[in-house]
Amino acid sequence: MKSFYLTDKGKVRSHNEDSVIIVKNLEKDYLMAVADGMGGHSAGEVASSIAIQYLGKHFQESFLHMDKAQAVDWLRDSVNEMNSLIFEYEKNAPESKGMGTTLVVAIVTKDYILFGNIGDSSGFVIKNDKLHKVTYDHTLVNLLVSAGELTEEEAKEHPKKNVLMKALGANDPIDIDIFDCDMGVSSILLCSDGLTNMLEEEQIQKVLLSDLSVEDKVIKLIQKANNRGGTDNISVAYLIRNKEGGK
């Protein structure tokens, strides 16, 4: 497996509130995660950092010899702990009130692949040379689309398209949506909405299927998002499981 991750503040924001990680444990299981922080006075940056730092350390220390059911429980417990840590920080730092973060995570083992998400950071896979979205965005417009009150096209241009219905640090208790993924996928992409708001899925797919190294694919996605305006922080984590093109 080959992997690479990168985060960029974009062309408009003054600082970066995203955090991203890919780590491997002693059993060569992988954890990938992207968190998109929110809140003023750099609090969003703190919230996303709390989540990602805890998750990476906890994975390397405790994620061993787990079957799929145990991994699901581990992920739910980890989310509850991250949520508690963010609320605890907020309690001790009143200026950070209102901070929170999205989270999208993938656990990749030789026996199973799990995705989880809270908020509107996204998880995708490449299977049979096609990009497929695995996760479901917890946004107001997605809720309206599900209820039949908005079309997919209307949702893309809706003024409240970034209003979240769920985030770490904003909901207590919190629950994470978990998806059991097909083992036939060749690669996994996690990203913040700074990428998906700038690029269509077809554009993302074209880059991922190009004959570039894993590093250059990630760099090119961020460059393309910035070329289209870069209105938000952009974070990408990418892992190739099987040969799909690329060096």
Image: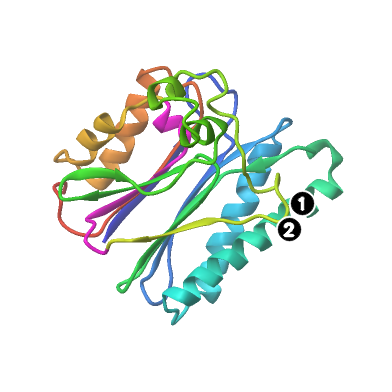
| Residue in front for this viewpoint, 99 or 116 | 116
In percent of width and height, residue 232 lies at 51, 26
Element under label 2?
helix
- Which residue does the image show at 44% across and 82% down from the upper left? 65
Mark 1 Cα-neighbour bin, 10 Å: few <14, some 14–19, many ≥20: many
Question: Closest to the observer: 42 or 198?
Answer: 198
Quarter of the picture holding the N terminus: bottom left
Determine whether, in the image, residue 7 is placed left or right of residue 139.
left
Residue 102: mark in rendering: none
Please give the range of residues in magenta.
183-197
Residue 125 placement (x, y as % from top left): 29, 49
Q: Position of residue 59 (x, y in %)?
A: 52, 68
Asked which quadrant contains residue 108, the reply is bottom left
Residue 185 on the magenta span: yes
Amino acid bearing label 1 = Phe
Is 137 magenta? The answer is: no
> Left or right: 239 with respect to 105?
left
**Relative to 109, does residue 43 appear above or below in the rendering?**
above
Left or right of 221 on screen, residue 213:
left
- Tell me how far mark 2 sits from mark 1, CA to CA: 5 Å
Residues at marks 2 and 1 touching, judged by CB atoms closer than 8 Å: yes
Residue 192 rendering spot, x and y as whole percentages: 47, 38
Q: Which residue is mark 2?
A: 84
Residue displayed at 71% across by 56% down = 173
Residue 87 is marked as 1
Crowd rating for badge 2 (residues with CA inside 10 Å; few <14, some 14–19, many 20+): some
Identity of the residue drawn at 75% across and 37% down: 98
